[in-house]
Image (cartoon, rainbow, N blue to C red):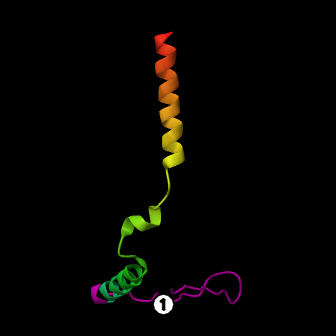
Amino acid sequence: MNFLCIHSASGAGTDEAELPPPPDESQEEDRDAEAEAELAAVVKDDPLAAYDVDVRQEGLAIQEYLMLLQQRQKQ
């Protein structure tokens, strides 16, 4: 990452600094390919493995709630 610093010798004005040229398309493509490779190395075979959670307890609570609603409707 490049930063531009502008210094003032007398405090009255700023020295003109030369900006770095914008990256060309090949540099951007190389950067994108490198970032993609880093991300791909982190991804596991099964993308849903990161979301592997046990929802049985929530399922039981929902079933119990529905059962209570049915009983209430019968009354």
Judge the density around disc 1: few (<14), some (14-19), many (≥20) Cα neighbours within 10 Å.
few
Q: Is residue 61 above or below residue 54?
A: above
Question: Looking at the image, which is closer to me, 16 or 4?
Answer: 4
The amino acid sitting under disc 1 is Glu
- From the image, give the main secondary structure of the stretch colored magenta: loop
- x%, y% of residue 4? 55, 85
Residue 23 horizontal side relative to residue 70, left or right = left
Instruction: Pick whichever, 72 or 21, lies toward us.
Output: 72
Secondary element type, mark 1: loop
Residue 25 % position (x, y): 28, 85
Residue at 54% across, 87% down: 16
Can you give x and y, in whole percent of width and height, for residue 31 in the image?
Answer: 37, 86
Q: What is the span of residues highlighted in magenta in the rendered image?
A: 1-26
Residue found at the very far right of the displayed protein: 10
Question: Above or below — where is 25 with respect to 69?
Answer: below
Look at mark 1 in the image and give the residue it sits on: 18
Q: Position of residue 11 (x, y in %)?
A: 71, 83
- Residue nearest the observer in this picture, 1 or 64: 64
- Say left or right for 59 vs 43: right
Residue 49: quarter of image? bottom left
Q: Which residue lies at the image location 40% right of the left edge and 79% below the top edge?
A: 39
Q: Is residue 53 above or below residue 69?
A: below
Residue 66 in magenta? no
| Count of numbered tags | 1
